[in-house]
Image: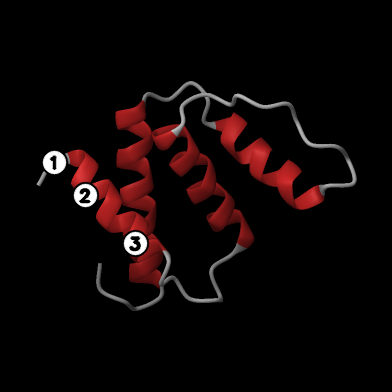
Amino acid sequence: MGLQEEFEEYAEKAKSLPESTTNESKLILYGLYKQATVGPVNTGRPGIFNMRDRAKWDAWKAVEGKSKEEAMNEYITKVKQLLEEAGTSA
């Protein structure tokens, strides 16, 4: 299985993460996913009153220097870790 296929598989598995998954973990996954699928941040930072989108933007910006492959690998690793912590097999 290639990296792209494995990434897509774990993107699907990420949808089944438990509600107890922390916002911090979700933001890490969001940033890595956007970096892997879109590339570097291509929008302006949302305003101060848009806290949710601002946090997502910041998470994406935090991984801006990573290559598509690095972001995919880190995303897969993070999903596996979260599934193990939740007691779900990866």
Give the amino acid type for the residue marked by disc 3 in the picture. Glu
Residue shown at 38%/35% (left/top)? 71
Residue 80 percent location from the top left of the image: 31, 59
Residue shown at 55%/76% (left/top)? 19
Point out the residue furthest to the right here.
49
* Count of marks placed on residues: 3
Give the amino acid type for the residue marked by disc 2 in the picture. Glu
Quick check: marks 1 and 2 in contact, CB under 8 Å? yes
Which dot marks residue 53? none
Question: Local crowd at mark 3 within 10 Å, few (<14), some, or many (≥20)?
Answer: few
Question: Could you say whether the residue bearing mark 1 is in a helix, strand or loop?
Answer: loop
Residue bearing mark 3: 12
Residue bearing mark 1: 2
Give the amino acid type for the residue marked by disc 1 in the picture. Gly
Residue 76 percent location from the top left of the image: 31, 50
Q: Pick the quarter of the image with the C terminus.
A: bottom left
Q: Nearer the viewer, residue 43 or 17?
A: 43
Question: Could you say whether the residue bearing mark 3 is in a helix, strand or loop?
Answer: helix
Question: Could you say whether the residue bearing mark 2 is in a helix, strand or loop?
Answer: helix
- Mark 1 and mark 2: Cα distance apart in space: 6 Å
Residue bearing mark 2: 6
Q: Nearer the viewer, residue 48 or 43?
A: 43
Give left or right: position of 13 versus 53: left
Residue 61 percent location from the top left of the image: 61, 30
Question: Local crowd at mark 2 within 10 Å, few (<14), some, or many (≥20)?
Answer: some
Label 2 vs 3, first from the N-terminus: 2
Give left or right: position of 30 versus 52: left
- Mark 1 and mark 3: Cα distance apart in space: 16 Å
Quick check: marks 1 and 3 in contact, CB under 8 Å? no
Is residue 43 positioned above or below 54 on the image?
A: above
